Image: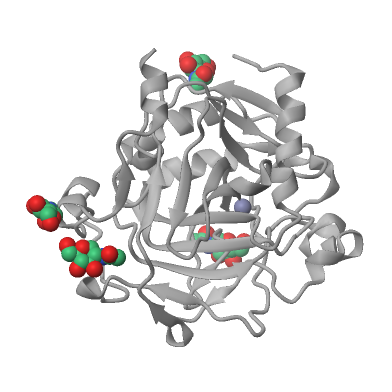
Amino acid sequence: MHLISTFAFAFLQAFHFINAEDFGYDGVRGPTYWGERYQECRGKHQSPIDINILRVKQVALPDISFVGFDDSIDDVHVTNNGHTVLIEVDNEPHPRVSGGPLDGDYIFSQMHFHWGDNDTFGSEDKINHRSFPMELHMVFFKEEYKTAQEAVKHSDGLTVLAFFYELDRHKHPAYDDITAALANVTEPHTTVVMSHPFSILNILPYDLNRYFTYRGSLTTPPCSEVVIWLDFEQPVRLAHDQIEAFRELRSATGKIRHNFRPIQPIGDRVVFYNVDNKYFNYNEVDNPDEDNTQRRKRGHNRSNVTLAKDSPRTALNAV
Ligand SMILES: *[C@@H]1O[C@H](CO)[C@@H](O)[C@H](O)[C@H]1NC(C)=O
Ligand SMILES: *[C@@H]1O[C@H](CO)[C@@H](O)[C@H](O)[C@H]1NC(C)=O
Ligand SMILES: *[C@@H]1O[C@H](CO)[C@@H](O)[C@H](O)[C@H]1NC(C)=O
Ligand SMILES: *[C@@H]1O[C@H](CO)[C@@H](O)[C@H](O)[C@H]1NC(C)=O
Ligand SMILES: [Zn+2]
């Protein structure tokens, strides 16, 4: 096993903002009690929420620019922090996003997952009361704030791109390297370097044009209300065994069987739904017999998702 130094561990802790042992998902350390130690967890604009499709406001936002998402990234670290598994990159420059509802550029910080005891629930946000078995959070901080730690002090400090998962009969090949790495970080506070270069775009759904967006919070303490959420509508499809691999991870107190926060009141907030009018049809029925390749062919035309081709990273990696 390829363990990383305590230096890396301290670094990772910093990214997660607070000490890993300070909260949990059950009993007296569970979400019901977070507010006792972390005032902001009692705020009025908390996440996650249940998005009611009948109450969203349809909008046509500018295209999102995804920079560095199709680069092949080396030195990707996979870490069990006792709550979830974090995926982080060392190389500069980091991937970034701008456009859509965002004002300015947001720099990649880390991504991590939330899941449930079985495949019937586990996502944090819901859509029309529907839970998904797992959810990916890609966390970015606003460039002008320089670091994630500084960004969490500002109401527009972070954006999280959230992706839902649903079951497929077939494995998603791009997730094999992740699940292989999971097997080496089952113990809390362990880190492994992914065995192959990693490309973010490969693990995302095909349609990046349709998403819900709203203002909310971190879903873990300190629950800071600093997040512009983008929840992409099209789920990523994984095989049951691939999701099951996450449930083997352990915290200090045993297997992490679930790590999602319950739904919070939406309050006075409006959820916007970005639709490409050409394709507007919510809840298109997926055929469970269709595999990922067929679906990709059928999928919405991605040509106007802006992928910056000549990001500086490409040049850097070539050296
Ligand atoms: C999933 O877990 C929930 C809560 O533990 C339980 O009520 C439900 O029966 C389980 N469903 C399946 C299909 O195992
Ligand atoms: C995980 O450990 C196995 C051996 O148990 C090894 O073959 C594999 O390469 C490791 N994976 C990573 C990502 O290091
Ligand atoms: C997507 O659109 C581009 C240009 O608009 C076109 O060349 C391409 O064939 C389309 N792809 C699919 C799968 O429809
Ligand atoms: C995507 O491109 C189509 C034409 O190819 C255009 O009609 C549509 O408005 C574009 N979508 C966005 C979000 O710009
Ligand atoms: Zn999260």
How was this image coloured? one colour
Tell me residue 186's x, y (percent): 63, 30
Seen from this angle, which residue lies furthest right? 36
Near-viewer residue (246 or 21):
21
Position of residue 74 in the picture relative to residue 123 (left or right) = left
Above or below, 136 relative to 5: below
Q: Residue at x 76, y 37 (%)?
A: 14
Q: Residue at x 48, y 43 (%)?
A: 96
Which residue lies at the image location 39% right of the left edge and 47% below the top edge?
66
Q: Quadrant of residue 254?
A: top right
Judge left or right: residue 171 versus residue 102. left
Q: How many marks?
A: 0
Seen from the viewer's position, the closer of residues 311 and 75 is 311
**Does residue 309 appear to the left or right of 106 in the view shown?**
left
Q: Quadrant of the N terminus?
A: top right
Q: Can the viewer see residue 66?
A: yes
Q: Residue at x 34, y 57 (%)?
A: 208
Q: Quadrant of residue 6?
A: top right
- Is residue 118 something one can see in this rendering? no
Residue 307's quadrant in the figure? top left
Q: Position of residue 77 (x, y in %)?
A: 57, 27
Relative image position of residue 163 (x, y in whole percent):
45, 55
Q: Is residue 264 above or below residue 195?
A: below
Q: Position of residue 142 (x, y in %)?
A: 60, 50
Q: Is residue 107 above or below residue 29?
A: above
Query: Looking at the figure, which quarter contains the C terminus?
Result: top left
Quarter of the displayed picture in which ligand 3 can be seen = bottom left
